[in-house]
Image (tube, rainbow, N blue to C red):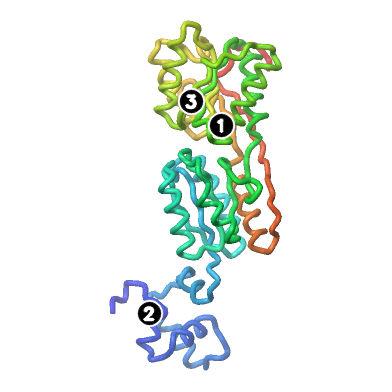
Amino acid sequence: MDKKKPVSLKELAIELGVSISTVSRALKNSPEIGKEMREKIKALAKERNYRPNPFAMSLLKNSPRIIGIIVPDIVTHYYSSIISGINDKAHENGYSTIITSSYEQFEKEKKCLEDLINIRVEGIIACLSQDTADYTHFETLAEQNVPMVFFDRICLTDKFSSVITNNVESSQEATEHFLSTGSKRVAFIGGANHLEIVKLRKHGYLQALRERKIPIERELVFCKRIGYEAGYEGARYLLSLANPPDAILAMTDSLAFGAMKAIKEAGLTIPADVALIGYTDELHANYVDPPLTAVTHQTYKMGETACTLLLEQLGGVGKVNQVVVPCILSVRGSSIKEVNHVD
């Protein structure tokens, strides 16, 4: 046997000629196992580099104590910060987590869900992929009473608890910020219109225009996909208009970064020619030139809150609950035309 390779309970049991349950109880200092045998088992476990496998042990108990997570993208700071909040809250309460990614694809999202159910997680926390417009796979979970919570991009709010930001109010505030600091003609770049989050943020943008009695022009709204390339494409389209905007509200930072590239390629200056605001406040927002004004999400708190809601369900509290974690407008160099103006 390779002494450097961690061994399982089964391998220890075979080497000692006892049952797996005997090894397990001995390692937990159970008085049911004699002191001599306990010490012998512990010594061998140490020598063979045994480490507990919480997943395997939980399956033996038929109580997984594992929470599944589905995100559209693992690598961004936005989702990793939310995952950190989920992980910390889960671990505080004796749960492990398994993280999966849909890569913004509907079919991959369904596969993630199927895999998590097959390994018998106790509950799931998820954010929809931007391709997801059919919620049948989640409706099935509701029928089976599988505990589940959505965050950010949500669906089926009558069946599942969720954690969102104040999408309408925050986008209205961002648009008002433009109009109060020298911008006159504000455009909006969003994702696919079937996503509730796109509808809400677009609504806040339009509401700000209505309150200022500014005519709404459909050509100033570009909603296609979420991502850097879509932001670049959207900004190029907007800047090609006969009467282009002098400010752009992008509903994610990735869209804003793409828009920033298009604005600079057009030989225009940010914010003097085109002011710009993003959403979520990725780490890069501080390092681009100029630094990006962004609607900052309290991501860690969103993750903690989502996990708390799921833990309540796992504890028998079945009430569907929608929680709003407010955003904060972080003003930097990309949005204010009138430098001396106090917003």
Can see residue 91? no
Q: Position of residue 129 (x, y in %)?
A: 48, 42
Q: Is the residue under label 3 in contact with that under label 1 (CB below 8 Å)?
A: no
Q: How many marks?
A: 3
Q: Please tell me which residue is depicted at 40% across the width and 10% down the height of the picture.
A: 267
Relative to 11, residue 278 above or below:
above
Closest to the observer, 113 or 101: 113
- The residue under label 2 is which amino acid type? Glu
Q: Which marked residue is nearer to the observer: mark 1 or mark 3?
A: 1
For the residue pair 209 and 73, the one nearer the viewer reads as 209
Amino acid under disc 1: Val
Q: Could you tell me residue 294's position as x and y percent? A: 56, 28
Residue nearer the viewer, 298 or 210: 210
The residue tagged 3 is 256
Q: Between marks 1 and 2, how big is the CA–CA gap?
A: 57 Å
Query: Vertically, is 198 above or below 3?
Result: above
Question: What residue would you read off at disc 2?
Answer: 47
Q: Quadrant of the N terminus?
A: bottom left
Q: For this rendering, which residue is in front, 118 or 40? A: 118
- Taking the spot 47% from the left edge, 59% from the top edge, the residue there is 116
**Circle 1 sits on which residue?**
198
Which of the two labelled residues, at mark 1 and mark 3, occupies the earlier sequence position?
Answer: 1
> Mark 2 or mark 3: which comes first in sequence?
2
Neighbour tally class for label 1: few under 14, some 14-19, many 20 plus, Cα within 10 Å: many
Dot 2 surroundings within 10 Å: few (below 14), some, or many (20 or more)? few
CA gap between label 1 and label 3 equals 15 Å
User: Dot 3 lies on which element?
Assistant: helix
